[in-house]
Image: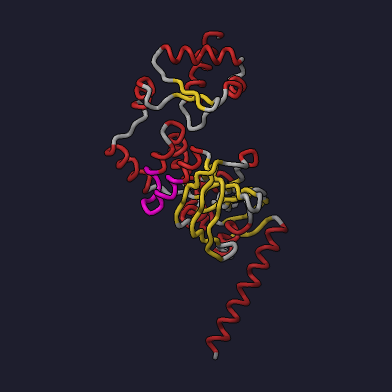
Amino acid sequence: MVEQEKIQRTLRLLLLLSGRKNYTISELAEKLSTTNRTIYRYLETFREVGFQVERINGRFSIDKVSPRYKELSSLLYFSPEEAYVLSRALDIIDDGNPVKQQLVEKLYSLYEARNVAATIVKKANSEIVTNLVDAISLGMQVILKDYQSSNSNSISDRVVEPFGFTYNFLSVWCFDPVSQTNKVFKTSRIGTVIITGNRWQFEKHHKVGHLDHFRVAGYQTHSVCLQLNLRAANLLKEEYPLAETGMRLQKDGTYIYEAEVSNFEGVGRFVLGLPQDIKVMGSQEFIEFLKEKMKWHHLAVDSLANVENH
């Protein structure tokens, strides 16, 4: 058992040193639940077998040009032909499909994040995502040029600290130094990404929030409970595959969907699109939200009718 623990610790250290982030000796010792002295011994062992261990500003990593590192990397390398076939295969899977997400997560853990992004992201969006991946890897602030915000109904530049992605690179988690809050930005609404060269200043505040089944992100959650007929249940599973994890079949043939959502916008659009197929069981907060949306809908219809009458 002791020997197995040593092997596991050695492999974990190797993974940490070959990752995107560099660590101090104390950080490595804490992560591996061992002493600084032991970490130094492991590093010396890595050097003896051919790895080039780098130290920059007190932080350690394995040099990517190390012969031994290249031998390991070759196991995870995709040829251009393999990457093309993989890209075509993943592209036909819906972005919300949990199988696609599992594949992406495995690729992300095994392969350089930049190459994973280039493989699965649509070409029109690939430069934006790969720039964000590079910024996260380097711990740099970026400028999101010409970001189209649906909340403020405006286009503006945002200086932020990106630190993570939602499913399949659809959105990026960022810390906004101006508002001092974490936010999520849709990558498809970003004009271009400029890496500023300024390092993160607020890393301790970085926090990934909740992403619900309707691909809406946020830092608070709200409970919803719906009763769906077969038509609504099928549409929900087809449009938002992850929602199936919150569904259960009733004896009368209907389905109950219960889940936590980031806000009511995503689930609200779905419910309002199928009013005769869905019964809202809860919460009262969600019911009030729908009533308000329906009121604005009726006002818009009445206004349109008045315009047509004139």
Closer-to-camera residue (67/123): 67
Residue 121 drawn in magenta: yes
Closer-to-camera residue (146/304): 146
* Residue 234 in view, yes or no: no
Residue 175 drawn in magenta: no
| Horizontal relation, residue 107 to residue 211: left or right | left
Indicate how the structure is coloured in the image.
secondary structure
Residue at the outermost bottom position? 310
With respect to residue 61, does 238 lie above or below?
below
Residue at the image position 44 percent from the left and 54 percent from the top = 192
Q: List x then y, in percent, for residue 242.
A: 52, 46
* Residue 245 in view, yes or no: yes
Q: Main secondary structure of the magenta part?
A: helix
Residue at the outermost right position? 284
Q: List x then y, in percent, for residue 310.
A: 54, 91
Q: Residue 58's image quarter? A: top right
Residue at the outermost front position? 57
Marks counted in the figure total: 0
Closer-to-camera residue (205/15): 205
Q: List x then y, in percent, for residue 124.
A: 38, 54
Residue at the image position 62 percent from the left and 75 percent from the top = 298
Residue at the image position 71 percent from the left and 58 percent from the top = 285
| Horizontal relation, residue 25 to residue 114: left or right | right
The span shown in magenta is 118-131
Q: List x then y, in percent, for residue 218.
A: 62, 50
The N terminus appears in which quarter of the rendering? Answer: top right
With respect to residue 289, does 56 lie above or below?
above
